[in-house]
């Protein structure tokens, strides 16, 4: 059987671990050729290797999405290797939690450079290759782009920006065949949340009390977010653009 995105070329940032790795592998399993981008070259290589072992197509690329030239190079490498670009998943992100008045310039700059500028650079680099053929951009934000939590003021600001970037891109390119949607995960079991968990009393405490803020009563798993990203990347979501898709186990329903 043909996969749900058979013949499509995909770029996934932050593909070395967590949601990014699960997404890259899910897209490949459904017929996509995937460039796995990550600031950690070794982890990107590991994800690409895991994909190619299944018989699917993948390459790895070391990229810091805060560097616009590096992002342009990543997109160009995908087009050179596979001949086109159909899907971009702007997943790479950082979470550097703390009280706002204690946040250093370095923390603020890094958060905004990766979480906001990184997605802007990704969209800017990808769109010219999608014009005339169409494409799907999926940005990964967070429920914290919609609701705040303690110690996450800067992070929440960056994720709110991701949501509005998505809406702006969707409007600008709606008649040009390019869709742009954003996924807002709740608490997912990935290392990006560990620093925040320490400020909340530790990961064990967070998971012991998770039903107090995530009604489903457990953390999400990376593959559960990857499934939603796959849907948005595929033609099954052909009427969706500018959508904010919340995948949070009921967190924002309270």
Image: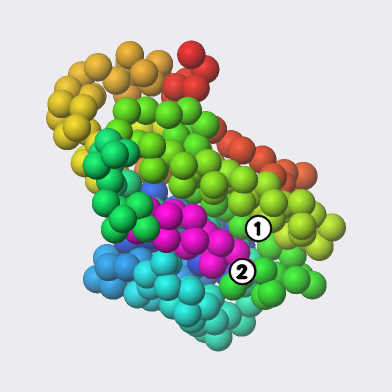
Residue contact at pointers 2 and 1, CB within 8 angstroms:
no
Name the front one of labels 2 and 1.
Answer: 2
Above or below residue 3? Residue 224 is above
Judge by depth and name the residue closer to the eye, 15 or 93: 93
Residue shown at the point (44%, 77%) measured from the top left: 70
Q: Does the magenta-highlighted stretch encompass residue 113?
A: yes
Q: Which residues are magenta?
A: 110-124
Residue shown at the point (17%, 34%) measured from the top left: 198
Numbered mark located on residue 188 in the image = none
Residue 225 screen position, x and y as percent: 46, 41
Numbered mark located on residue 124 in the image = 2
Above or below residue 47? Residue 239 is above
Q: How is the image coloured?
A: rainbow
Residue 234 screen position, x and y as percent: 64, 52
Q: Which residue is mark 1?
A: 136
The secondary structure that most of the magenta stretch takes on is helix
Residue 117 screen position, x and y as percent: 49, 61
Above or below residue 59? Residue 181 is above
Q: Does the magenta-highlighted stretch encompass residue 203?
A: no
Residue shown at the point (42%, 67%) measured from the top left: 65
Residue found farthest to the right: 175
Secondary structure beneath label 1 = strand
Asked if residue 203 lies left or right of residue 138, the reply is left
Label 1 environment density (alpha carbons within 10 Å; few <14, some 14–19, many ≥20):
many
Q: Is residue 76 visible?
A: yes
Secondary structure beneath label 2 = helix
The quadrant holding residue 76 is bottom right
């Amino acid at each position: 059987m043909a996969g749900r995105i058979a013949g499509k070329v995909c770029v996934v940032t932050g593909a070395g671990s967590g949601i990014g790795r699960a997404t890259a592998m899910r897209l490949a399993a459904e017929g996509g050729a995937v460039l796995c981008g990550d600031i950690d070259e070794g982890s990107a290589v590991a994800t690409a290797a895991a994909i190619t072992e299944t018989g699917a197509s993948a390459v790895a690329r070391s990229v810091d999405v805060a560097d616009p030239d590096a992002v342009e190079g990543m997109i160009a490498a995908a087009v050179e290797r596979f001949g086109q670009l159909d899907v971009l998943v702007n997943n790479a992100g950082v979470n550097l939690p703390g009280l706002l008045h204690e946040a250093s310039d370095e923390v603020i700059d890094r958060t905004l450079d990766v979480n906001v500028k990184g997605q802007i650079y990704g969209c800017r680099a990808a769109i010219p290759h999608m014009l005339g053929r169409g494409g799907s951009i999926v940005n990964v934000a967070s429920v914290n782009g919609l609701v705040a939590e303690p110690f996450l003021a800067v992070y929440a600001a960056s994720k709110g920006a991701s949501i509005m970037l998505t809406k702006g891109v969707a409007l600008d390119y709606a008649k040009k065949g390019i869709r742009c949607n954003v996924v807002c995960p709740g608490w997912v079991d990935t290392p990006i949340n560990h620093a925040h968990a320490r400020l909340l009393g530790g990961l064990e405490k967070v998971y012991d009390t998770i039903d107090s803020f995530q009604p489903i009563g457990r953390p999400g798993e990376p593959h559960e977010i990857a499934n939603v990203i796959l849907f948005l990347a595929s033609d099954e979501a052909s009427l969706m653009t500018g959508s904010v898709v919340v995948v949070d186990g009921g967190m924002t329903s309270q």
